Image (cartoon, helix red, strand yellow):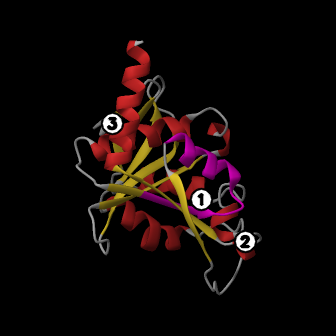
């Protein structure tokens, strides 16, 4: 397995253009609870996933998230460049199977990507978006050091429950991250 990034419990590997990887994404996106804040719980068809989501995953910045101990597929994490940003910015995201929720996997993978993004990958800013009502996802972003920036309201053709409360943007800059790392190191030395 070609591992892009490993943590204590997780291995993030590139997606491959195989039916087995597509099957994993189709299974993930067919769970109404997983898709609740994305499609209102409506599963995407295999064809939609192949043409839209999966092609984007193969182009880079998306990694299949697996348990290191067993290789079990948990979902995915992403850190993909934002092309229309005035600074070197990446978009952070994740989607995990329901069986992986509440175990810290989303935070563990996202924190590792934040470290790699500001370190080896050289990003200046990392952003993330979620629905305002998605409290679990907002908590993961906060645990990763991202701070609330703004709420926006889109005119969605098929709004889902909670859309009236808007989408929230979170962000963290390299400078903020370096400051936090320095403070943490000082506390650990004391």
177 and 129: which is toward the camera: 177
Q: What secondary structure is marked by label 1?
A: helix
Along the viewing direction, whichever of 18 and 80 lies nearer the viewer: 80
Residue range (magenta): 127-144
**Which of the marked residues, 2 or 1, is nearer the chain's N terminus?**
1
Taking 189 as reference, is 158 left or right?
right
Tell me the number on the disc at residue 158: none
Q: Which residue is mark 2?
A: 165
Q: Residue 153 vs residue 114: left or right? A: right
x, y percent for residue 129: 53, 63
Disc 3 target residue: 5
Say whether disc 3 or disc 2 marks the residue closer to the N-terminus: 3
183 over 142 or under it: above or below: above
Residue 171 lies in the magenta-colored region: no
For mark 3, does the 10 Å Cα neighbourhood hold few (<14), some (14 to 19), or many (20 or more) residues? some
Q: Secondary structure at mark 2?
A: helix
Contact (Cβ within 8 Å) of mark 2 with mark 1: no
Q: Which numbered disc flags the more N-terminal residue, 3 or 1?
A: 3
Viewer-nearest residue: 161 or 28: 161
- The quadrant the C terminus occupies is top left
Q: Residue at the spot x=55%, y=36% of the render?
A: 105
| Residue mark closest to the camera, 2 vs 1 | 2
Q: Is residue 12 visible?
A: no
Q: Residue visible at 67% across and 63% down?
A: 132
Location of residue 110 in the rendering, given as x and y in whole percent from the top left corner: 46, 43
Q: Residue at label 1?
A: 29
| In magenta segment, residue 134 | yes
Task: Give the CA distance from mark 3 to mark 1.
Answer: 23 Å
């Amino acid at each position: 397995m070609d591992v892009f990034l490993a943590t204590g419990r997780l291995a993030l590997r590139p997606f491959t253009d195989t039916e087995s990887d597509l099957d994993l994404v189709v299974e993930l996106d067919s769970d109404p609870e997983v898709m609740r804040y994305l499609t209102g719980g409506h599963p995407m068809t295999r064809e939609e996933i192949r043409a839209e989501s999966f092609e984007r995953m193969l182009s880079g910045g998306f990694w299949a998230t697996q348990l290191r101990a067993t290789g079990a597929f948990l979902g995915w994490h992403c850190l993909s460049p934002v092309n229309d940003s005035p600074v070197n910015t990446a978009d952070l995201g994740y989607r995990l199977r329901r069986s992986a929720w509440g175990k810290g996997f989303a935070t563990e993978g996202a924190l590792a990507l934040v470290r790699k993004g500001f370190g080896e990958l050289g990003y200046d800013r990392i952003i993330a978006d979620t629905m305002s009502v998605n409290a679990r996802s907002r908590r993961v972003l906060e645990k990763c050091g991202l701070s609330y920036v703004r709420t926006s309201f889109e005119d969605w053709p098929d709004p889902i429950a909670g859309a009236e409360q808007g989408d929230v943007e979170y962000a963290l800059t390299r400078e903020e991250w370096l400051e936090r790392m320095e403070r943490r190191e000082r506390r650990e030395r004391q």
